[in-house]
Amino acid sequence: MKKRYAIFLFLGCSIFGFSQKIAEKKVQSLATQIEISTLGLDEVVLENSTSEFIEMYLTAENPNQQHLVYKEAGETVYIKFHIPEMSTEDPVFRKFITQRLQRASAIIKIPQQKSVIIFGDNINITSKSYKGPLDVYIENGILKLDTVQASTKVKLYEGSVFASLKDANIQAVSTSGTISIDQKIQQENFYKKAANSAIHFTITTSKANIFLTTYKTQ
C-alpha cells in the first residue's frame, strides 16, 4: 500500500482592500506522473521540490471560496483549482471577472524525475528549470521554461515561449509566429539533432513566438 501524508494549511487575510486566501497542501506520493489543470488561474510556477513532498501553494484575491483539489489514481496525481465565479447578472462582466480578475496564482513544487503534464486555456507558466519530463498543452500564454533539464513537449495556439537548451534535440514549429534561435530570426521551422543526447524539446504552435537559447555543456 502506498504511503501518503498530507498537511493542510488554510489562511485568510486582507491586503490592500482585497480578500486574499492562501491555501497550502503537502503530499508524499509514489506516483510517477503529475497532471495539473490550470483552469481558474492566471499564473503557475513550477519548481523542484527540495523534499520528497509534492508542495502546492495557492494564492487568490476573490471573495468566494478557493479550493485546491488533489486526487491520486494509480501512478498519476491530479491537481486542479476549483475557483467559483463571482455572482453577477451581467454575462459580459461575469466573463471578465472569471477570466482575468481571479488574481489567482499557484506555486507547485515537484520532486525531480516525476513526469509533469500541464493543461490550460489562458495561463502564464514559469518553470524554474524543472528536472523532470514536462508537457504543456495550453491555448494562450507566456511560457518561461528557464533551462530545460529533461524532454519537454509544448503545444499552444498563441503567446510566447522562452527557453534555454543544452545539448538537446530541437523541433520548433510555428505557423505564423517568430522563431528566434540564439537571437537570430529563422526563416522557417527549426530542427536540430544533438549527438548523444536523450533530451528532446518539441514545440508546436500556430501563432506563438518562440525564443530559444542554445549552448553546449563543457
Image (cartoon, rainbow, N blue to C red):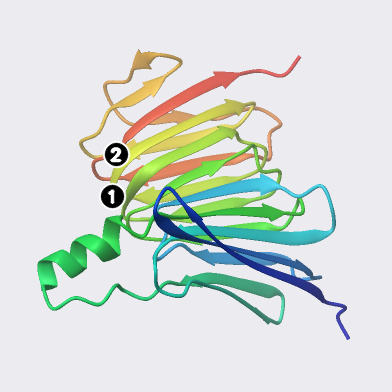
Above-or-below relation of 214 to 8: above
What residue is pinned by disc 2?
A: 208
Residues under numbered marks 2 and 1 in contact, where contact means CB atoms less than 8 Å apart: yes
Classify residue 137 by image quadrant.
Answer: bottom left
For the C terminus, the quadrant is top right
Q: Residue at x 28, y 50 (%)?
A: 157
Q: Residue at x 84, y 53 (%)?
A: 51
Above-or-below relation of 43 to 91: above
Mark number, residue 157: 1
Q: Position of residue 208 (x, y in %)?
A: 29, 39
As shown in the figure, which amino acid type bears the numbered disc 2? Ala
Mark number, residue 94: none
| 66 or 39, nearer to the observer | 66
Using a 10 Å C-alpha cutoff, classify the residue at mark 2 as few (fewer than 14 neighbours), some (14 to 19) or many (20 or more).
many
Q: Residue at x 61, y 35 (%)?
A: 148
As shown in the figure, which amino acid type bears the numbered disc 1? Tyr
Q: Would residue 4 appear left or right of 41 to someone viewing this image?
A: right
Q: Position of residue 167 (x, y in %)?
A: 64, 26
Q: Residue at x 48, y 43 (%)?
A: 202
